[in-house]
Amino acid sequence: MIPEIRSQFNRSFTPAKYASLLEMLEQRCGVRIDFRVAETPIFMRGTQLEVMAEIGADLTHRLMGSADYLAVARQAIPAGYRVAGETVHPNFVTDDFALVRNPAGELVPKLVEIQAFPPVYGYQAILCSAYRDVFQLDPGLNTFLGGLNQHEYWALLARIILAGHDPENVVLTELDPLHQKTRPDFEVTAARLGIAVVDISEIEAIGNKLHYRSAYGHLVPIHRIYNRAIADELIARNVRLPFDLTHAWDVRWADHPDWYFLISKISIPWLSSPPVQNPVVPPDVFLNDFVEGPGREELAATGVPLPARSTPETVYRELLLKPPLLFRGQGNSV
């Protein structure tokens, strides 16, 4: 994105340096990296990233501020997965943007999806530092927004996840965490914050409290859960948890599981329609509205080129279809 820095990086790149990057990542994460690591970082101007962060915050506030939208979004929460003690706001929101050229030739952001769920916050910090060290990047290149440095970033993450609790009583939960590709992030986060990584299916309920087993087999009460388990996967694997998610347990969540559904790809058709329409959100409608309702006309009214007639053989070359609640990049949207 910054031509001079890109050219300099490309000239200095070697396969040996990339191999060193992978080796350093595994050393710093403490486990094997089972997903592909990009050969290069992306070099963007800080102003571009700050603008996208501001847009993401604005979209999030619009969603949280609409009782009508939240009422509809709650209908997407599967039976048995509406968790007690819903918080007034999410702790984490991730906005994915594409960059496209406008008629003036400028690169502008377009929303791909929005999700109130924590991504790999720990791993991405380690990745950025590894790029910097292996490729000897300019120390003036930043990797954090809001003026934060690495120390302040981890302090903020600790404040949100721990929320003042003793790290011994805070757990990072996932389903079968030792076999998830995101395990490097779990290990980095656990090591930096001093918390345990716990399989959510092994949590034990006693009275009104939840517990986990320490490395020594001792029962430890859980006061706060840094939740990385996704209801979709629990449902897909037909997992029966040993505790009832809907019960009002004496525990706090970061993030509360309901927000995964409340701020998700389900929100994009709402964000792309008046009166909350934002130019960064591409035209978007639900498939059932496109097939049986006014969705086709709504897209056409925004200038989306569509075939004049719709038949079983019609090919819509200008549309993408994205399942609204599938996770980890599965699928794409009208």
Image (cartoon, rainbow, N blue to C red):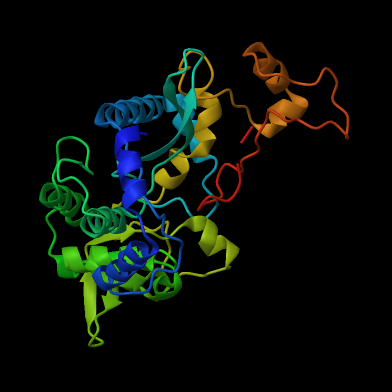
The N terminus lies in quadrant? top left
* Residue at far front of view: 11
Q: Picture coordinates of residue 321 (x, y %)?
A: 66, 38
- Res 251 seen here: no
In the image, residue 266 sits, relative to residue 120, either above or below, namely above
Residue lying furthest bottom in this view?
216
In which quarter of the view is residue 210 placed?
bottom left
On screen, residue 260 versus residue 291, left or right, reads: left
Residue 64: x and y, percent? 37, 30
- In the rendered image, is residue 290 in sight? yes
x, y percentage for residue 91? Answer: 28, 44
Q: Report which quarter residue 302 is drawn in.
A: top right
Q: Residue at x 73, y 23 (%)?
A: 293
The quadrant of the picture occupied by the C terminus is top right
Q: Is residue 284 above or below residue 82?
A: above
Residue in the foreground of this view, choosing between 236 and 188: 188
Residue 148 shown left or right of residue 214 in the figure? left
265 relative position to 255: left or right = right
Task: Tell me the residue at 49%/17% (across/down).
Answer: 102
Q: Please identify the quarter of the rendering in which residue 131 is found.
A: bottom left
User: In this view of the protein, which residue sits in the foreground, 116 or 202?
Assistant: 116
The number of callouts visible is 0
What residue sits 49% from the left and 57% below the top?
A: 231
Residue 74 is situated, as x and y percent measured from the top left of the image, at 49, 39
